[in-house]
Image (cartoon, helix red, strand yellow):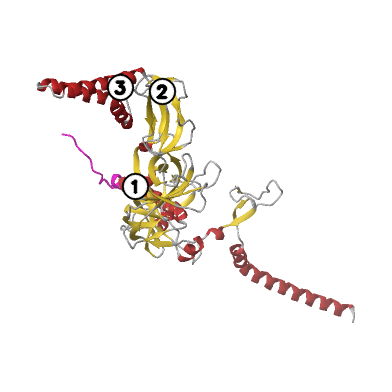
């Protein structure tokens, strides 16, 4: 190829390249703005940047946290509502997470820095016929909580009272012997404590000048009566008879036994010693004098106790008083006589409480002819209360007790629990009497009721808050539209 041919080929190629460049530049000039707008449309623009470890901390420009981590960009489309996003719920107020009764109309934090929990309108929607505090729980939650229920029923309640008793003397069978006159112990026939004596057993002989004088007067009166019984004067005869009667009564008043008086009448011989006899069969609990001792009416010669019948004192608590009645049967066991049960009865209920123990004492009586029961023994006593109460009862564990009131949770329908105040009666056999508040056949919660109670109190406080908010809204609306009522004074 010669030089001319090469030059011609180069010129043609240059022309074709220029034409192609012109065509490309023209086409791109027309399409360029559209493509640029599309790219700008598809590009996401961050609204702000937030701390990856603490989302509440934000920045309008890219930044790093204290650990060197980049802030995360937040784009506009992330905050736009999606087509299927649920309708935003209305927040009524905010409540303290640790104390639900503390609320706030605006977001707040408690003393520990915890955010208040929002309470939405639909969470506390309760129909008008439902009492405040009614709780609705889904079946799955009820099963997880382990909620159990029982029916209130009407039945007779009986009660056995168990307590510790103390064996003591029968006060009506306890005697203390004192002389009726001054004198000296001439002879002591019974001188040992604990000795068993029968009725009319001679205990001691007492020498007393007054007794000797009284015997002499009686013998003189008998002699005068013998002389004057045939007197023609009635007054003289009657005077002699009265003197005999008076002298004999004086001896009787000084406790001269009947057999000594008869001996005196027969023998007309004065007895130096006066015999003192046991008034009943019993045990000598105390000997207060010895032979030769000078005694006065203030000297206790003997203390005797008849133990064929004994008393047992039992202290019961105040809440057991409604069950006890005089005549109730009592069963007793003592450690000193194992394997044997003694049967007695309630004979007295003391009309006061012990201030220190806050208990009421009752007295039981037991037969003790064989003298095996001994005073000061301790005993385990069971009082079979005969009192029966026809009452509406529920299990005792169903009662939610507080310092000021008692309540139960009644099942109104499956999953719905109503708190109800009740007045309690007596308790026995694991059941508690309900005087008012629950009817026979109603179903009450017997377990997990404290969890339900917490939710109930929360619902009740929420309902009160809603009423306050509604009242404030109505007042504000009335003032805004001019419908608020104004009271004019004339």
- Secondary structure of the residue carrying numbered label 2: loop
Q: Which residue is mark 3?
A: 215
Is residue 436 something that shows in the picture?
no
- What residue is at 49 percent from the left and 33 percent from the top? 193
The verdict on residue 200 being magenta is no
Q: Is residue 389 left or right of residue 315?
A: left
Q: How many residues crowd around disc 1 within 10 Å: few (fewer than 14), some, or many (20 or more)?
A: few
Numbered mark located on residue 299 in the image: 2
* Residue depth check, mark 2 versus mark 1: number of the one nearer the observer: 2
- What residue is at 45 percent from the left and 59 percent from the top? 88
Q: Is residue 18 left or right of residue 176?
A: right
Q: How many residues crowd around disc 3 within 10 Å: few (fewer than 14), some, or many (20 or more)?
A: many
Q: Are marks 1 and 3 in contact (CB under 8 Å)?
A: no
> Relative to residue 416, is residue 13 depicted above or below?
below
User: The magenta stretch spans which residues?
Assistant: 477-490
Which quadrant of the rendered structure holds the N terminus?
A: bottom right
Give the mark nearer the N terminus: 2 vs 1: 2
Could you give the CA–CA distance between mark 2 and mark 3, rounded to whole angstroms? 23 Å
Q: Residue furthest bottom?
A: 1
């Amino acid at each position: 190829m010669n030089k001319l041919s090469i030059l011609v080929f180069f010129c043609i190629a240059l022309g074709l390249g220029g034409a192609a460049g012109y065509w490309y530049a023209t086409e791109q000039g027309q399409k360029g703005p559209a493509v640029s707008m599309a790219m700008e449309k598809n590009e996401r623009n961050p609204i702000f940047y937030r701390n990856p470890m603490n989302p509440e901390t934000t920045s309008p420009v890219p930044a790093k946290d204290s650990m060197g981590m980049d802030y995360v960009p937040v784009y506009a489309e992330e905050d736009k509502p999606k087509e299927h996003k649920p309708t935003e719920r209305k927040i009524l107020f905010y409540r303290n997470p640790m104390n639900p009764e503390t609320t706030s109309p605006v977001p707040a934090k408690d003393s520990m820095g915890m955010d208040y929990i929002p309470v939405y309108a639909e969470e506390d929607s309760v129909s008008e016929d439902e009492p405040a505090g009614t709780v609705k729980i889904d079946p799955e939650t009820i099963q997880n909580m382990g909620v159990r229920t029982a029916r209130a029923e009407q039945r007779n309640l009986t009660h056995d009272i168990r307590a510790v008793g103390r064996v003591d003397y029968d006060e009506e069978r306890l005697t203390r012997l004192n002389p009726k006159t001054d004198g000296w112990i001439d002879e002591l026939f019974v001188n040992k404590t604990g000795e068993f004596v029968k009725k009319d057993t001679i205990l001691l002989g007492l020498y007393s000048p007054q007794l000797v004088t009284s015997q002499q007067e009686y013998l003189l009166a008998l002699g005068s009566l013998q002389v004057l019984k045939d007197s023609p004067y009635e007054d003289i005869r009657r005077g002699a008879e009265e003197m005999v009667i008076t002298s004999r009564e004086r001896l009787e008043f000084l406790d001269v036994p009947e057999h000594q008086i008869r001996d005196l009448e027969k023998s007309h011989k004065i007895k130096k010693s006066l015999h003192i006899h046991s008034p009943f069969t019993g045990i000598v609990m105390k000997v207060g004098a010895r032979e030769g001792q000078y005694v006065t009416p203030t000297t206790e010669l003997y203390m005797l106790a008849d133990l064929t019948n004994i008393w047992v004192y039992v202290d019961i608590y105040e809440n057991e008083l409604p069950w006890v009645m005089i005549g109730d049967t009592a069963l007793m066991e003592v450690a000193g006589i194992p394997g044997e049960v003694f049967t007695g009865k309630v004979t007295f209920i003391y009309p006061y409480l012990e201030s220190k123990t806050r208990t009421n004492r009752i007295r039981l009586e037991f037969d003790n002819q064989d003298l095996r029961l001994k005073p000061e023994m301790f005993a385990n006593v069971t009082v079979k209360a005969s009192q029966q109460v026809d009452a509406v009862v529920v299990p005792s564990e169903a009662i939610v007790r507080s310092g000021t009131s008692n309540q139960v949770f009644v099942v109104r329908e499956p999953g719905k629990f109503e708190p109800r105040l009740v007045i309690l009666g007596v308790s026995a056999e694991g059941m508690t009497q309900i005087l008012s508040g629950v009817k026979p056949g109603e179903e009450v919660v017997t377990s997990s009721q404290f969890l339900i109670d917490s939710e109930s109190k929360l619902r009740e406080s929420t309902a009160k808050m809603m009423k306050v908010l509604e009242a404030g809204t109505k007042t504000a609306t009335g003032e805004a539209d001019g419908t608020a009522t104004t009271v004019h004074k004339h």
